[in-house]
Amino acid sequence: MTGKNIVGIVFSNSYDECLPELTGLRTMGSVPFAGRYRFIDFTLSNMVNAGIEDVGVITKANYHSLMDHIGTGKPWDLSRKTKGLIILPPYSTAEQGGNDDKIASLKGIMGFINRANEEYVLLSDCNTISNIDIEALTEYHTEKNSDITVVYKHGQIPSLSDVLVLDLDEDGRAKQIDVTPVTKKTGNYSLSVMFMKKSLLEMFMNEAISKRYTDFETDLIQRNVKKLNIYGFEAKGYSATIDSLSTYFKAIMDLLDINNCNELFNSERPVYTKTRDDMPSTYGIGSNVKNSLVANGCIIDGEVENSIIFRGVRIEKGAVVRNSIVMQESFVASGSSLDYVIMDKIAVITPNKNLSGAENYPFYIGKGIVI
């Protein structure tokens, strides 16, 4: 099986409400990550690294920054005369399904799905940061004669509604599927990446429409666990599912561990993003930077430790930034101190301000806010 026989569908707004601080003005897919990336970069890169050439991105709200970021899809080689990257228009419905209205969104793009010539479909949300080997996934799917293959990770179950937790037999087939179980704290939880035949998805949607189903995971996946061969495919390497501001903070800070960074940014499966030409970062005399990731275009004259600094940030002499995330074009003035802080884009900290949060409860400064 080749990627040319797979159509990718990306849900860019999935679980927006779990990260309201960052998704108030943008989709989950366009949330900034790791200095220069967005969440959707990992989803799109996973697909194109497997040779997928036809990708539809479903939008719902706050999608302008997403459109600005992905454009025509050129950074992922998806700017094509035929197929390529397609932004699917916002959908609206009086029906309110599960947490992310997956059935409602799929109803709105049935024309796109029906017109696709590919035999298989790969469905993916954007709130999971992972470098998934989709080629290995498709080979596993064929080897097991699977109807649906769900990518999963074993560990603490995210605090999300509609998260699938798989009870697998020795062969990897799902014996039972729970949806957001209350009693389980750890298990094989889905990374919201599913692979199946397009004809099966079309059958699911016809069934959902005729029977007025509203929840994709419960009404279509869990309900069919005994009827279909549903297998789990374990994702290797580092991954993080974002369900809150604290897990977002932890996911970015995890990259200060070189092992996590190397697993996520695998040279064999690169992560692509929108390029921005800028000068290298400059470090002033007396500046001090320790155990941090600093993107290009920054001017660092102060002290930075255990932090992630995005493009174009300026930190003045006498400013101290520790255990923090400072996003694009933000400014920290002399005499100010940040500790466990998330600064959104183009935020400003004026002189002599001391702001501090905690590892499990970082202090958030909104986009464009001046303190």
Image: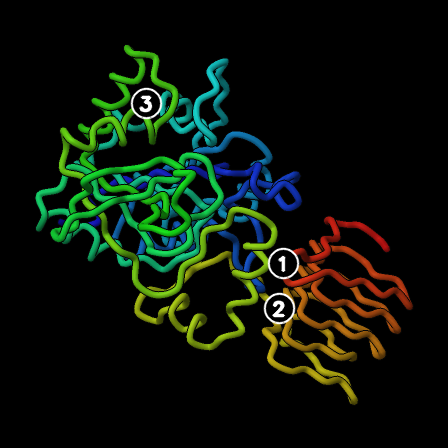
Q: Residue at x 38, y 45 (%)?
A: 184
| Marker count (numbered) | 3
Q: Mark 2 highlights which residue? A: 308
Please state if 319 lies on the left or on the right of 199 as rendered.
Answer: right
Residue closer to the observer: 331 or 157: 157
Q: Position of residue 90 (x, y in %)?
A: 50, 26
Instruction: Give how far apart the Cα atoms at labels 2 and 1 are.
Output: 17 Å
Q: Mark 3 highlights which residue? A: 110
Q: Are marks 3 and 2 in contact (CB under 8 Å)?
A: no
Instruction: Give how far apart the Cα atoms at labels 3 and 1 are.
Output: 41 Å
- Up the image or down, 20 lies above or below 134; here it is above
Residue closer to the observer: 361 or 111: 361
Q: Could you tell me if residue 326 is visible in this image? A: yes
Q: Nearer the viewer, mark 3 or mark 1?
A: 1
Q: Could you tell me if residue 81 is visible in this image? A: no
Q: Residue at x 8, y 43 (%)?
A: 145
